[in-house]
Image (tube, coloured by chain):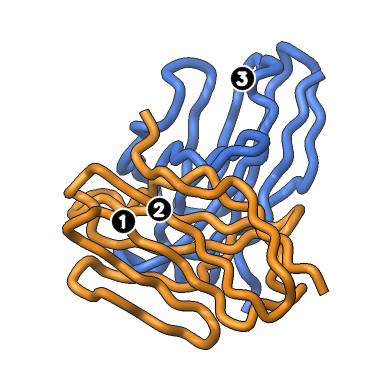
């Protein structure tokens, strides 16, 4: 049973480009969470999604960031017009429902140059 | 405003020692307190978790102590090993919400042979 799969593992973008981060949850998991981790910091919640629905996006920046979890396929975190401050590790986690704890993927490390 | 305060920032112990990592919170809306272990380049992995109606929980060499009145909880690692060298994060989850977690800033633990 594969864990939470994130790709790419590393992503380099120039300022102003778009970044697309993908997350395939564990089999049977319908809840997906995205977190951002800045260097030497803890993880910060960004968004919680279920299939085709955004449940809680209270941690998402108001501009340039969006997320989706379509009926088919992985969840996508999209960052438009990236800036240097977007450089961070982005982690996805999934759970089968409103259960205790969830499983994180290995993350996508975004570097904006 | 840091909702979950974690200390120390870094910790060095000898093999066999008992490192203790402390966390404090203010928000009484939290109902679940997990600890995560993270190795470099990897995602956080759930280590152990506790609910506020329990004062202590043990799993193997890991113990959580919880003081509800003081709003503090701590992780103890018994008989620590060099393989325990990692960054440890405490977290807290909002009750009745979207399952989002608020993380501490992390403690980098080094266990010397």
Residue at 51% in and 78% down: B62
Colour in which chain B is drawn: orange
Q: Which residue is under mark 3?
A: A80
Of residues A93 and B81, the one nearer the viewer is B81
Residue at 41% in and 66% down: A101
Colour in which chain A is drawn: blue
Q: How far apart are marks 1 and 3 (CA)?
A: 40 Å
Q: Distance between the residues labelled 3 and 2?
A: 36 Å
User: Taking A107 as reference, is B57 left or right?
Assistant: left
| x, y percent for residue A51 | 40, 52
Which element is circle 2 on? Answer: strand
- Where B77 falls versus A12 (above or below)? below
> What mark, if any, has residue B23 been given in the picture?
2
| x, y percent for residue B57 | 36, 80
> Same chain, marks 1 and 3?
no
Residue at 67% in and 35% down: A39
> Same chain, marks 3 and 2?
no
Residue at 79% in and 68% down: B112
Q: Which of marks 2 and 1 is nearer the N terminus?
A: 2
Which element is circle 3 on? Answer: loop
Q: Which residue is under mark 1?
A: B72
| x, y percent for residue B98 | 29, 49
């Amino acid at each position: 049973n594969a864990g939470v799969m994130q790709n790419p593992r590393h992503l380099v973008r120039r300022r102003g480009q778009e970044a697309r981060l993908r997350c395939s949850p564990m089999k049977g998991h319908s809840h997906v969470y995205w977190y951002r981790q800045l260097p030497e910091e803890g993880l910060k919640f960004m968004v919680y999604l279920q299939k085709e629905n955004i449940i809680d996006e209270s941690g998402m920046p108001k501009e340039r960031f969006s997320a989706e979890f379509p009926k088919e396929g992985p969840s996508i975190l999209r960052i438009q017009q990236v800036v240097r401050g977007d450089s961070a590790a982005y982690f996805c986690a999934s759970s089968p429902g409103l259960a205790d704890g969830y499983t994180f993927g290995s993350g996508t490390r975004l570097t904006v140059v | 405003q840091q909702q979950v305060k974690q200390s120390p920032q870094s910790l060095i112990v000898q093999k066999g020692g008992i490192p203790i990592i402390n966390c404090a919170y203010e928000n009484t809306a939290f109902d679940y307190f997990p600890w995560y272990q993270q190795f470099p380049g990897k995602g956080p992995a759930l280590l152990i978790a506790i609910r506020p109606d329990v004062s202590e929980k043990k799993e193997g060499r890991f113990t959580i102590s919880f003081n509800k009145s003081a709003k503090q909880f701590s992780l103890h690692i018994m008989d620590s090993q060099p393989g325990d060298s990692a960054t440890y994060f405490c977290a807290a989850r909002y009750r009745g919400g979207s399952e989002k977690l608020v993380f501490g800033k992390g403690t980098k633990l080094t266990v010397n042979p």
